[in-house]
Amino acid sequence: MTKAEACLWKFVLKSGKLQGYKFKRQRPILNYIADFMSPELMLVVETDGFSHLIKEVVDKDLKKQEDLEEVGFTVIRFSDNEVLHDIENVERELLAFIDDFENPPPQSPSKGGHRSPVSPSGGGAGRFVGRKGEE
């Protein structure tokens, strides 16, 4: 477990600290290992270090994300830097996801009400990078 993963686990995800939802560490899903996973939320949280900026690794991350979304998971990615230097915002992003999960916004017939997908190498705060059935 990396330093960022350990901090995310200890200060945000461990023991139901996020609205009582339980997360599991290093869980196998399909042919992948998810950094963190909540079966209740159908949520995978990934922490990405420097190597995740390399094109080959980004391509593998995108394939993993597509496969996980195909079976119904939402994938949220944070950089190690975000976790280590702005963990409060990481927690806010996860709480916003939970709020959307518990209180889904009304959807028009032609559009889903969600945040836009972002590639794993994108900058900024935590990202909602897709939910099953959303474009």
Image: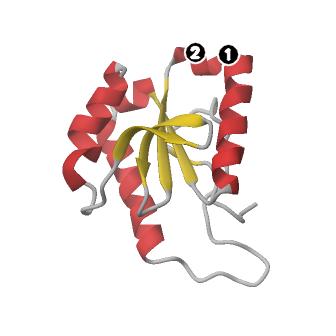
Q: Residues within 10 Å of mark 1 (few under 14, many from 20)?
A: few
Identity of the residue drawn at 62% across and 48% down: 129
Check disc 2 and give the amino acid type: Ser
Q: Is residue 62 left or right of residue 51?
A: right
Disc 1 target residue: 54
| Tag 2 near tag 1, CB within 8 Å | yes
Q: Secondary structure beneath disc 2?
A: helix
Farthest residue in the right direction?
110
Marks 2 and 1 sit apart, C-alpha to C-alpha, by 6 Å
Can you give x and y, in whole percent of width and height, for residue 105 in the image?
54, 78
Above/below status of 130 relative to 13: below
Q: Nearer the viewer, residue 6 or 135?
A: 6
Q: Which mark is residue 99?
A: none
Amino acid tagged 1: Ile
Residue at image coords 43%, 47%: 37
| Chosen colour scheme | secondary structure
Residue 24, position in %: x, y? 35, 45
Please tell me which residue is depicted at 66% across the width and 53% down the height of the picture.
Answer: 69
Residue 15 appears left or right of 68: left
Q: Horizontal placement of 74 versus 4: left or right?
A: right
Quickly name the residue at label 2: 51
The image shows residue 10 at horizontal and vertical percentages of 22, 36
Inspect this view and state whether residue 114 appears.
yes
Q: Position of residue 47 (x, y in %)?
A: 46, 31
Is 120 placed above or below 113 here? above
Q: Quadrant of the C terminus?
A: bottom right
Visible residue check, residue 85: no
Query: Label 2: how many residues lie within 10 Å, few (<14), some (14-19) or many (20+)?
Result: few
Say which quarter of the image contains residue 5: top left
Residue 118: which quarter of the image?
A: top right
From the viewer's perspective, is residue 102 above or below residue 22? below
Q: Residue at x 50, y 59 (%)?
A: 42
